[in-house]
C-alpha cells in the first residue's frame, strides 16, 4: 500500500478549510489576479514594428501588412482578439517588453460584427534610396540606435539615418545603379553589398 504524498494531504486540508473562490460576474465586475493573462494590446508609442510578436504567435491572431506606394510607406499590425488564445508569447518575445502587453480584460464578447474584436496600429517604414524597397520601421531603427549606443556608428545606414533625423546631412537622390557615393545613403542589405563591391 502506497501512502499519500504530503503535498496531496496539504492540498486536501487547505481546500477543506478554505472558502470556495467564486465571483458574482456579470452582476458585479470581476477583478482578476495580477498574473492574469487577458487580451493583448499594442502600445503604439512603445511598439517598434519589428514583427517579433507576429512570428511567435501560435494561433496566427497577429499579422502585419507592408503598404508601399507613391503616397506612403507603412506597416500595419492587426490583432484578432477572437482568435487569440492569450498564451503571452507576444509579450514574452517583444524586444522592448512594452510594445504589446497582456491586459486584465477578459470579457470580449460582442453582439456586433467581428470587426469590433480587432486592433490595428500603423508604423512608418524606411525605404531604400536605391531600389525603393522597404528596409525597416523607423521606430525600429531608432530603438536599435538607442540600444547599441555609440556603436551604431559602425553601420552606415544608421549613421545616415541619424544625420537626416538631426537635419545635418542633405538628402541626395540616388541612381538605380550602385555607385561609390551610395555608401552614404540609406540602403537595404542587397544594395549596400552591391555598392561596396562596385567601389
Image (tube, rainbow, N blue to C red):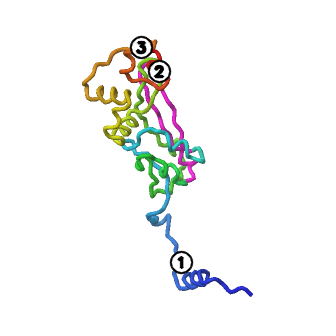
Residue 82 among those drawn in magenta = yes
CB within 8 Å, label 2 to label 1: no
In this rendering, would 111 be left or right of 181?
Answer: right
Please rate how many residues cluster around mark 3, counting C-alpha atoms within 10 Å: few if below 14, some from 14 to 19, many from 20: some
Q: Which mark is residue 191?
A: 2
Which of the 4 image quarters holds residue 163? top left
Percent coordinates x, y for residue 140 in the rendering = 40, 37
Name the residue tied to disc 3: 179
Percent coordinates x, y for residue 47 in the rendering = 41, 42
Percent coordinates x, y for residue 135 in the rendering = 45, 28
Q: Which mark is residue 20?
A: 1
Residue 100 lies, with reference to residue 197, above or below; the image says: below
Residue located at (48% from left, 38% from top): 77
Element class at badge 2: helix
Please rate how many residues cluster around mark 2, counting C-alpha atoms within 10 Å: few if below 14, some from 14 to 19, many from 20: many
Q: Which mark is residue 169?
A: none
Residue 62 among those drawn in magenta = yes
Extreme-right residue of the structure: 1
Q: Which residues are magenta?
A: 61-85
Indicate which disc, 3 or 1, sits on the residue closer to the N terminus. 1
Q: CA distance from mark 2 to mark 3?
A: 10 Å
Amino acid at each position: 500500500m502506497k501512502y499519500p504524498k504530503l503535498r496531496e494531504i496539504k492540498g486536501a486540508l487547505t481546500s477543506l478549510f478554505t472558502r470556495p473562490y467564486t465571483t458574482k460576474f456579470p452582476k458585479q465586475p470581476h477583478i482578476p489576479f495580477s498574473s492574469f493573462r487577458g487580451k493583448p494590446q499594442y502600445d503604439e508609442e512603445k511598439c517598434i514594428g519589428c514583427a517579433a510578436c507576429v512570428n511567435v504567435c501560435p494561433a496566427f491572431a497577429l499579422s502585419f501588412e507592408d503598404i508601399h506606394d507613391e503616397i506612403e510607406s507603412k506597416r500595419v499590425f492587426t490583432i484578432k482578439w477572437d482568435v487569440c488564445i492569450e498564451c503571452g508569447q507576444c509579450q514574452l518575445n517583444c524586444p522592448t517588453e512594452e510594445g504589446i502587453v497582456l491586459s486584465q480584460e477578459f470579457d470580449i464578447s460582442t453582439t456586433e460584427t467581428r470587426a469590433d474584436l480587432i486592433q490595428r496600429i500603423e508604423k512608418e517604414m524606411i525605404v531604400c534610396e536605391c531600389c525603393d524597397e522597404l528596409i525597416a520601421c523607423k521606430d525600429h531603427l531608432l530603438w536599435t540606435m538607442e540600444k547599441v549606443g555609440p556603436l551604431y556608428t559602425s553601420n552606415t545606414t544608421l549613421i545616415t539615418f541619424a544625420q537626416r533625423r538631426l537635419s545635418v546631412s542633405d538628402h541626395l537622390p540616388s541612381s538605380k545603379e550602385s555607385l561609390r557615393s551610395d555608401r552614404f545613403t540609406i540602403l537595404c542589405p542587397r544594395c549596400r553589398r552591391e555598392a561596396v563591391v562596385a567601389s
